[in-house]
Amino acid sequence: MKRKLISLCLLPILAFGHFAMDFDEDWAAASAGPVTLTFKYVSTYPAAITIGGTGYGQPADPSKALVDDGDGVFVPWTSNTITLKGKQIRFRGDWRNSTGNFMELFSSTFVGGHNVTMSGGLDFEGTPAAQMFYYTFYGCSNLTGPIPSGLFGAISGTPAYFMFDTTFYGCSNLTGPIPSGLFGNISGTPAYAMFSRTFCGCSNLTGPIPSGLFGNISGAPAAEMFRDTFYNCSNLTGPIPSGLFGNISGTPARVMFFETFYNCSNLTGPIPSGLFGNISGAPADYMFTRIFCGCSNLTGPIPSGLFGNISGTPATEMFFATFYNCSNLTGESALMPDGTTHLYEQFPTASGTECAQCYYNATGLNDYATMPSAWK
């Protein structure tokens, strides 16, 4: 919801009677100012920047998309190439394109050796549309500093496909923790590739993954929903939050947790029980490929029933390198919900890339020496 400034000429009128309460409320909102996304160069800045990748096009209504090119004055959009007049560039108003999203809005905009911070956020409120923030900051390797907590506005409602796919891909100089509530109040059934590659390559993000980061999702898994989400986020610390992926249930989907925590080598503590909800049914291709690969500081036992009540014909790379180099895990290797049947006993015919290197170098597990060689 856009905030509206109140003209000072109304002050004498609003100072009397029941209008006083309305004024106090409106002034509190007005004093916060309009929603603005600000980029500020740390030292030097380029002569011009280009926004809007090929998938973006231009604002649906240029008159509502305002930009301050560094001189402190907001003017409506005229071109995706912006000649800079100062170190601070601001965006205000409605920057959604004709399909109602911000896809590729700043894709590869902040590169080339000029470090820049960001603050504030985009003026958006409502349910995410398909591809809403797809590739929004893709490849912005010169974005530095923390991610603003209100960057994506006030999001709520059902997930949409590709909504945060590749949003910060390659933003290797972003620092600080991921803000709690970054993705708003999302709830409902998972959507295809909804958080695929979101933080892929953000190797300088620090701190723990916030509890409830992905809202309150529930229902059947979607293909590629958390593919490479934290790929190579090697400086994230602390334990994986319980309930991070909501309350999913039903048949596994292909690539659903492919490399989700790949090389998150500073995550610590035990893997939380019920992390993958209550999945059941036949395995899907690549469903847990390399999900914890390189998470060498995860500790404690693997919780019983971590992978739910799955059964049937082994699928391609279903458990390929799943716990690769998780050398500090202890206790038994992954067990089915009955607490006694090992994963490799549930799938005795699994071979090759279906299960190869699943427990490679996970030598702290009690049954490492006796488990089938196909699994290590």
Image: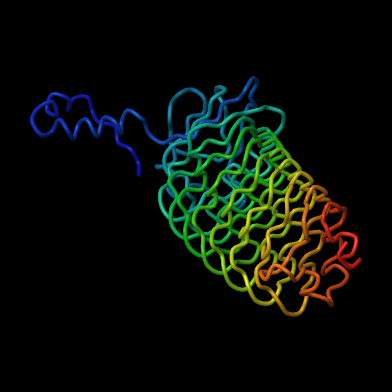
On the rendered structure, is 168 left or right of 92?
right
In this picture, is 47 found above or below 245? above
Q: Residue furthest bottom?
A: 312
Q: Which residue is situated farthest in the top direction here?
A: 43
Direction from residue 278 to residue 227 in the image, left or right: right
- Count of residue discs: 0
- Residue appearing at x 83%, y 74% in the figure: 350
Given residues 355 and 373, the one toward you in this image is 373
Question: Which image quarter: residue 108?
Answer: top right
Q: From the top left corner, tell me how far across and down residue 12 is, in percent.
A: 13, 24
Relative placement, left or right, of 369 versus 94 is right
| Residue 255 coordinates in the image, percent (x, y) | 70, 64
Figure check: 123 above or below 312? above
Q: Is residue 99 visible?
A: no
Q: Is residue 119 above or below residue 288?
A: above
The quarter of the rendered structure image containing the N terminus is top left
Colour scheme in use? rainbow
On the image, the x and y values in percent for residue 10 come to 17, 28
Report the front residue among 10 and 153: 153
Residue beneath the point at 72% across and 57% down: 302
Of the 4 image quadrants, the one containing the C terminus is bottom right
Q: Position of residue 238 (x, y in %)?
A: 66, 41
Residue at screen point 47% across, 41% down: 122
Q: Residue 223: name its quadrant.
A: bottom right
Q: For the point 47% across and 55% down, which residue is it?
A: 186
Taking the image as drawn, is residue 215 in sight? yes
